[in-house]
Every structure is written in C-alpha cells, then in structure tokens.
Image: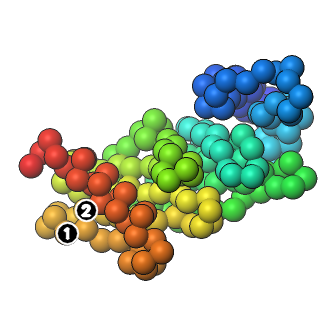
C-alpha cells in the first residue's frame, strides 16, 4: 500500500508541480522548487495513522517556504464522511500536520474529490473545500477555507431558511477579507437557483 501511495504521489507531483509553480529554468542558479523523491517518501511514510482512503491531494505555496509549502489531503470515510488534513513543510524539509478538520457538517455531505482545490486570495494560496447537504443542493451549501498565514480554517454554511452561519472568529475585523470571500462564494453558488 505504501509503495502504491508513493507511486501515486510521485505521479501527481509531476502533473501538479509544473503548472502550479510557473516557468523556471531547472539549470538556473536558484534552487528549483518541488519535492525530491526522498522527501515524498518520508511524507508518505508519515501517513501510516490514516485509515480512511485519501481521495485528493493538493500541493500549495506558502510565502517564504517555497513550493510546495503545504499539502492538503481529502479523506473519505464511510462512517465519518469527509475529513481534511493540512501539512506544512518545516525547516528540516519534512511535512508536519498543522490542521485537521473535525467531522464536517452534513452540509458538506454531497461533494467530490475535485472540490478540494486551492485559490489565490490577496497574494496567499488558500485551500478550499465545499459541498451541499444530501437532497438539498444547492440551497443548503457549505464552504471551508484553510488560511496558511492564520494556521486556521474558516467556514460558512447556508441553511434551509437561507440564513448563513459562520465559523467562530470570522466576525472579527481582521478576518473580514475571509468572510467577504466566503459570502461571494455562497452568492455565486446559489445564483443559478434563485
């Protein structure tokens, strides 16, 4: 299983690293970005505690760390549903778990592996996941964002009665950019059904 996971991570890195990291000269004087095979192997070995299937992997940039500075995993468990884990590259070049979602609200129940993605918001790459409640799409909708500079996740959830509930702390002035972005995403999501 570990060899298969290592193989899958290697192939995924080949496809994701190029387009995500932009154009670069591999023979330039600056150190090329990406992961070496031994780094990927160490990361793969560190995942031995995960029992649920990993259905999506996203590499993302963190200022001052390079690419990839972080790795987000989406797990799909038959009992607990979706779960997200975020790892950050440390000074020793190994990745450490820095954030893990609890069991996600039922408003995320109807989703897909391709809904774990990254997005550039104000010069920072954030990790995003969204979904709908079963049999209630698009009315009951939820979206979660992990913000590396905050080391935290924020979420917003639209309910059956069309009110929006936010994660604690999102109402603080310093988090207004995240709340505004989540509000725009909800508005875009429900626009076709209004």
Mark 2–mark 1 Cα distance, whole angstroms, equals: 6 Å
Count of numbered badges drawn on the protein: 2
Circle 2/circle 1 CB separation < 8 Å: yes
Q: Secondary structure at mark 1?
A: loop
Q: Which mark is residue 13?
A: none
**In the image, is 95 to the left or to the right of 159?**
right
Mark 2: few, some, or many residues within 10 Å (few <14, many ≥20)?
Answer: many
Towards the viewer: 120 or 8: 120
Q: Which mark is residue 158?
A: 2
Residue occupying image coordinates x 38% and y 44%: 111
Residue occupying image coordinates x 64% and y 40%: 59
Towards the viewer: 79 or 28: 28
The residue that label 1 is drawn on is 163
Residue occupying image coordinates x 22% and y 64%: 159
Residue occupying image coordinates x 60% and y 40%: 58
Residue 59 against residue 84 in the figure, above or below? above
Q: Is residue 50 visible?
A: no
**In the image, is 96 to the left or to the right of 114?**
right
Towards the viewer: 99 or 172: 172
Q: Secondary structure at mark 2?
A: strand
């Amino acid at each position: 299983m570990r060899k298969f996971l290592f193989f899958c991570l290697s192939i995924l890195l080949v496809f994701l690293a190029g387009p995500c990291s932009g154009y670069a000269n591999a023979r330039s004087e600056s150190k090329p970005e990406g992961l070496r095979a031994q780094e990927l192997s160490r990361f793969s070995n560190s995942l031995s505690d995960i029992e649920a299937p990993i259905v999506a992997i996203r590499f993302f940039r963190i200022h001052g760390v390079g690419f990839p500075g972080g790795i987000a995993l989406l797990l799909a468990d038959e009992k607990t549903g979706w779960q997200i884990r975020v790892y950050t590259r440390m000074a020793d070049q190994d990745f450490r778990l820095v954030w893990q979602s609890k069991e996600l609200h039922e408003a995320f129940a109807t989703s897909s592996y391709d809904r774990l993605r990254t997005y550039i918001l104000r010069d920072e790459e954030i990790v995003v996941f969204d979904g709908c409640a079963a049999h209630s799409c698009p009315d009951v909708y939820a979206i979660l964002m992990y913000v590396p500079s905050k080391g935290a996740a924020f979420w917003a959830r639209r309910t059956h009665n069309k009110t929006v509930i936010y994660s604690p702390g999102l109402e603080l002035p310093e988090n207004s950019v995240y709340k505004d972005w989540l509000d725009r995403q909800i508005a875009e999501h429900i626009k076709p059904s209004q």
